[in-house]
Amino acid sequence: MSRNNIRIAVQKSGRLSDDSLKLFKECGIKFESGGSKLRSISSNFPIEFLFLRDDDIPGYVEDGVADLGVVGLNVLMEHTRKVAIVKELGFSKCRLSLAIPRGENYTDLKQFEGKSIATSYPNLTSQFLLKNGVKAEMHEISGSVEIAPSIGLAEGICDIVSTGGTLLSNGLKEVATVFQSQAVMIANTALSSEKQAILDKLLFRIDSVQRGQNAKYVVLNVQEQNIDKVTALLPGMKSPSVLPLATKGWFSLHSVIEENDFWNIIENLRDAGAEGILVLPIEKMIL
Ligand code: ATP
Ligand code: MG
């Protein structure tokens, strides 16, 4: 059956859902979500959403049941599906890490030789260890992995960590990182040209939203003699706008700065004579 919209699979409820829905809403796409809804068609963009368990998303995209999907790189790489990664989305950042009971000494990975490791990611874990010349026994379990060492199920674990709080509260310590993960958008590898055109439009909007999130709009006041010094500190999209103020000799300067350098730049601007600095969020940034 051919459709004239693109179908995207997103997680129904979990650690990917809120940020996924937020992203599409920031892209100006209107749709209903929440409750027991499993499908939703947008009223203003040719896209249909399917709300699914995250584990099922790569398979649906590979088979073409969905054209696109949002999923953690960890889940995607564990099952090596034939799909294209079209965008790193920058949220749901976490890592897959090896951990052992806190009271044990850790020297290096060789320590895992011949040991049993409880994990939901047996492929990623064993590939990582083999690459480091270590052969361990994988004990695959689908959840509550942290409990495994304390009940004698395994000697170590390999699980998703973000802050490390869960490991700590289960008496474990993180000893090695296997894989860095974040949410990615994936696509079927045989999209029609119509669907590819819709995907391109969607990616253009995502780029604009992401660029806006990484940047701030800065407005400040500066005296004429300090304009050059202050301007040199502001990379901007092109060059800053300089507008005269009602007070003689004073100017208002407008520019865009990267979120990463933010505090350093602000401090340098003050030292260079900038006053009344306003920092505003940018909703979208179209180049
Ligand atoms: P589902 O019911 O859809 O199968 P799940 O329980 O398997 O959900 P979640 O716990 O919601 O999965 O995690 C989904 C994805 O979010 C993970 O595969 C991972 O990429 C990411 N993730 C997991 N834990 C964290 C965390 N603590 N911080 C940030 N991202 C995380
Ligand atoms: Mg899951």
Image (cartoon, rainbow, N blue to C red):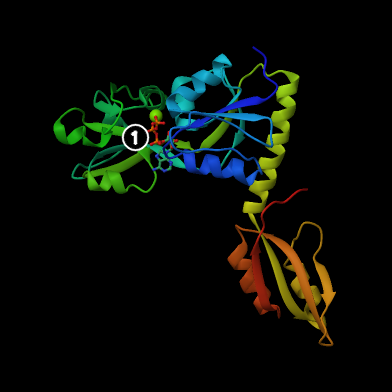
Rendering coords of residue 10 (x, y %): 51, 31
Is 2 situated left or right of 169 in this image? right
Ligand 1 within 8 Å of the CB at mark 1: no
114 w.r.t. 164: above or below: above
205 w.r.t. 66: above or below: below
For image coordinates 48% across by 25% down, the residue present is 77
Quadrant in which the N terminus appears? top right
Mark 1 burial class by Cα count in 10 Å: few <14, some 14-19, many 20+: many
203 or 21: nearer the viewer: 21
Q: Quadrant of residue 141?
A: top left
Residue with the most extreme bottom position: 248
Image quadrant, ligand 1: top left
175 w.r.t. 46: above or below: below
Is 176 situated left or right of 245 in this image? left
For image coordinates 26% across by 34% down, the residue present is 144
For image coordinates 75% across by 20% down, the residue present is 193
Residue type indicated by callout 1:
Asp
Rendering coords of residue 177 (x, y %): 40, 38
Q: Is residue 266 visible?
A: yes
Rendering coords of residue 70 (x, y %): 54, 32
Q: Is residue 92 visible?
A: no
For image coordinates 74% across by 61% down, the residue present is 235
Rendering coords of residue 118 (x, y %): 27, 28
Q: Quadrant of residue 85?
A: top right
Report the residue marked by disc 1. Answer: 159
What secondary structure is found at the residue carrying circle 1? strand
43 or 186: nearer the viewer: 43
